[in-house]
């Protein structure tokens, strides 16, 4: 098998290899937790690109099935990585959704979920991911998914008009 298509231990053979994820999985196994700076905009408004960070811990069989609203780190079928919120558990895995997105992703099988977010560092403030307030926020934000396009449009409108007034 081509080295670029060799699956990491515990992953289906069709999973493309991702050296970055291999290193992250190794660090989680060795250290028990890893802090990562958020990159990308898929978790806005909860987490912002290069401003916020998360603490990841290994996702274990005891964590299955993850509760809706829980943020997990997973490997996509194409070998890429994603950190999104669990919408629901289905027979083939979990359905995920980024807070800054309207579409769903999945099902992502249990074998491809390898970390859970335990702590968020949002704008410098530490928030436990499994605190009641955090879980309620996650569930409310999930419930607002059908309205996100309108919410994001309103936010953009306000920002544009505010930017024009501050000059």
Image (tube, rainbow, N blue to C red):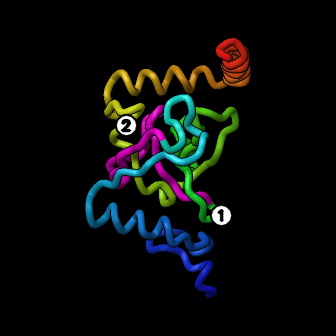
At a point 54% along the width and 23% down the height, the residue shown is 141
Question: What residue span does the magenta drawing correspond to?
Answer: 51-76
> Looking at the image, which is closer to me, 95 or 23?
23
Q: Report helix, strand or loop for mark 1.
A: loop
Q: Which quadrant would residue 3 be assigned to in this image? A: bottom right
Q: Quadrant of the N terminus?
A: bottom right
Say which of marks 1 and 2 sits in front. 2
From where the camera sits, is residue 113 visible? yes
First in sequence, mark 1 or 2: give its number: 1
Q: Is residue 21 above or below residue 167?
A: below
At a point 36% along the width and 21% down the height, the residue shown is 133
**Residue 75 magenta-highlighted:** yes
What is the number of the mark on residue 121? 2
What is the number of the mark on residue 78? 1
Name the outermost residue toward the top.
165
Q: Report helix, strand or loop for mark 2.
A: strand
> Looking at the image, which is closer to me, 164 or 14?
164
Q: Which quadrant would residue 58 be assigned to in this image? A: bottom left
> Looking at the image, which is closer to me, 113 or 124?
124
Q: Is residue 140 above or below residue 61?
A: above
Direction from residue 16 to residue 30 in the image, left or right: left
| Residue neighbourhood size for the residue with mark 2, other residues' Cα within 10 Å, grouped as few (<14), some (14–19), many (≥20) | many
Residue 38 placement (x, y as % from top left): 49, 46
């Amino acid at each position: 098998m081509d080295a670029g298509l060799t699956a990491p231990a515990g992953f289906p053979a069709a999973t493309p290899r991702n050296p970055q994820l291999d290193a992250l999985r190794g660090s989680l196994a060795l250290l028990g937790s890893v802090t990562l700076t958020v990159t990308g905009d898929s978790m806005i408004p909860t987490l912002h690109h290069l401003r916020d960070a998360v603490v990841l811990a290994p996702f274990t069989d005891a964590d299955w099935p993850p509760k809706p609203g829980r943020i997990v780190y997973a490997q996509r079928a194409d070998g890429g990585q994603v950190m999104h919120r669990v919408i629901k558990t289905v027979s083939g895995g979990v359905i995920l959704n980024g807070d800054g997105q309207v579409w769903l992703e999945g099902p992502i099988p249990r074998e491809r979920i390898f970390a859970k977010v335990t702590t968020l560092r949002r704008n410098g403030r530490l928030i436990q991911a499994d605190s009641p307030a955090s879980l309620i926020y996650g569930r409310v934000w999930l419930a607002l998914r059908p309205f996100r396009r309108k919410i994001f449009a309103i936010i953009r409108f306000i920002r544009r008009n505010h930017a024009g007034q501050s000059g």
